[in-house]
């Protein structure tokens, strides 16, 4: 399997190195036959090639079996017109990775985790309120006069339908419950279309129960009663916000994992930012990117019908969980003193059986 690794900005190279050490240990144990290649994206790519997402990197991403994407420091980027592209947004759009799949769960021993939390947020990834990816040409955000700023929310029936299928398929592998999230009584047309398509898709999965909730209601209820939620189906911007809140409830944003999946391609990327204040200090928590890679490897194993690949993903996930349960292995954000490389070595030892 060909894996393209894109370290990104700030803490990206550090957590990517930790993640690849884990992946190499799993490859050695399970014989996955991985071919891992690294390329530049982000500031280093712009310096070398004039773009944060060079064309040759996109071409390699299209050809790879899977992509591992480190965090990018987009908030510090200048104008997109000068090659400063949104790195994950561009890759998601070009590879049509329409499903952003973000788990959040409490783990034994991790401080500040909300008991009972174990949900999977399935977020539409390609349209919605995000103006940089919802137009064929130009931006969905503009100023018709100097005093008026407008932003277009794009919701399409095909995108609603395919993300709904992704959520209900995921529910079939879990507790068979889906919560569809929007604000339909306010955004009557766009959320009306989104929820309506979810309702239509639900008829194809009679074993799955589903309910609708407003975004503000679930924001409170997820905190108060996390145990009631299984799979959460949600639009792009609402999902971006809610998934960060959910993973914070699991103990730290450093645990934020995400898989961006389409019908034939997938990319793992941590669900947190590039943390420039931590860059170069060796203290960043690599768990988010590591857990994202377990999702990617599981996705590849399922797509290929390979139980061995799925088992490798489970072994990596178990090793991460066991390391997080050990106070001596935890990074600072989850109550420990270990560094990035220390945590990676602990995970590798558990995978290798040492």
Image (cartoon, helix red, strand yellow):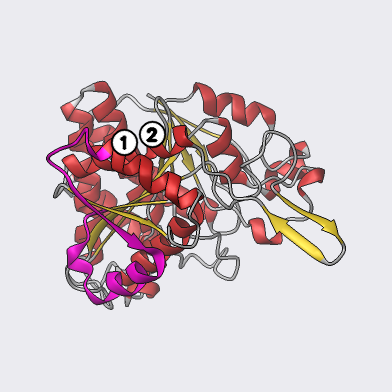
Q: Which of 254 and 191 lies nearest the eye of the viewer?
A: 191
Rendered image: mark on residue 348:
none
Residue 349 location (% of width, % of height):
24, 51
Q: Which of 6 and 244 lies nearest the eye of the viewer?
A: 244
Q: In percent of the image, x 33 and y 67: which residue is there?
A: 218
- Residue 129 is a magenta residue: no
Mark 2 closeness class: few <14, some 14–19, many ≥20 residues within 10 Å: some
How far is the residue under mark 1 from the one under mark 2? Answer: 5 Å
> As displayed, is residue 2 above or below residue 99?
above
- Residue 149 visible? The answer is yes
Mark 1 closeness class: few <14, some 14–19, many ≥20 residues within 10 Å: some
> As displayed, is residue 202 above or below residue 347?
above
Rendered image: mark on residue 162:
2
Residue lying farthest to the right in this orientation: 146
- Residue 331 visible? The answer is no
Mark 1 sits on what residue? 165
Q: In percent of the image, x 50 and y 50: which residue is there?
A: 189
**Local SS, label 2:** helix
**Local SS, label 1:** helix
Q: Which of 5 and 191 lies nearest the eye of the viewer?
A: 191
CB-based contact (under 8 Å), mark 1 and mark 2: yes
Quarter of the rendering occupied by the N terminus: top left
Residue 258 location (% of width, % of height):
39, 49
Q: In percent of the image, x 29 and y 69: which residue is there?
A: 222
Residue 229 location (% of width, % of height):
22, 60
Q: Which of 97 and 286 lies nearest the eye of the viewer?
A: 97
Magenta part of the chain: 202-231
Quadrant location of residue 252? bottom left
Q: In percent of the image, x 52 and y 43: which residue is there?
A: 155
Q: Is residue 202 left or right of residue 176?
A: right
Residue 53 location (% of width, % of height):
66, 38
């Amino acid at each position: 399997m060909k894996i393209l690794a894109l370290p990104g900005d700030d803490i990206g190279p550090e957590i990517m190195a930790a993640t690849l050490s884990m992946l190499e240990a799993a490859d050695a144990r399970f014989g996955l036959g991985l071919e891992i290649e690294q390329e530049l994206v982000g500031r280093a790519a712009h310096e070398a090639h004039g773009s944060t997402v060079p064309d040759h990197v996109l071409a390699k991403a299209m050809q790879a079996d899977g992509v591992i994407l480190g965090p990018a420091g987009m908030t510090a980027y200048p104008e997109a017109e000068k090659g400063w592209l949104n790195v994950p947004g561009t890759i998601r759009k070009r590879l049509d990775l329409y499903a952003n799949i973000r788990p959040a769960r409490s783990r034994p021993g991790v401080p500040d985790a909300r008991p009972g939390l174990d949900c999977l947020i399935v977020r539409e990834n390609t349209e919605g309120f995000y103006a940089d990816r919802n137009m064929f040409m130009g931006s969905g955000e503009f100023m018709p006069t100097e005093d008026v700023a407008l932003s277009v929310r794009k919701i399409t029936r095909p995108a609603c339908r395919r993300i709904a299928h992704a959520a209900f398929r995921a529910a079939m592998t879990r507790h068979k419950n889906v919560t569809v999230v929007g604000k339909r009584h306010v955004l009557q047309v766009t959320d009306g279309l989104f929820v309506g398509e979810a309702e239509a898709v639900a008829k194809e999965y009679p074993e799955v129960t589903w309910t609708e909730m407003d975004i503000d209601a679930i924001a409170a209820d997820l905190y108060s009663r996390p145990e009631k939620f299984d799979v959460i189906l949600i639009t792009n911007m609402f999902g971006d916000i809610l998934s960060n809140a959910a993973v914070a409830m699991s103990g730290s944003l450093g645990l934020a994992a995400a898989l961006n999946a389409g019908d034939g391609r997938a990319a793992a990327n941590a669900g947190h930012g590039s943390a420039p204040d931590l860059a170069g200090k060796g203290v960043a928590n690599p768990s988010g990117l590591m857990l994202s890679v377990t999702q990617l490897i599981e996705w590849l194993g399922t797509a290929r019908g390979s139980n061995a690949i799925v088992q490798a993903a489970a072994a990596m996930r178990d090793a991460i969980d066991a390391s997080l349960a050990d106070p001596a292995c935890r990074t600072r954000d989850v109550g420990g003193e270990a560094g990035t490389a220390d945590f990676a070595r602990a995970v590798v030892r558990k995978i290798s059986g040492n």
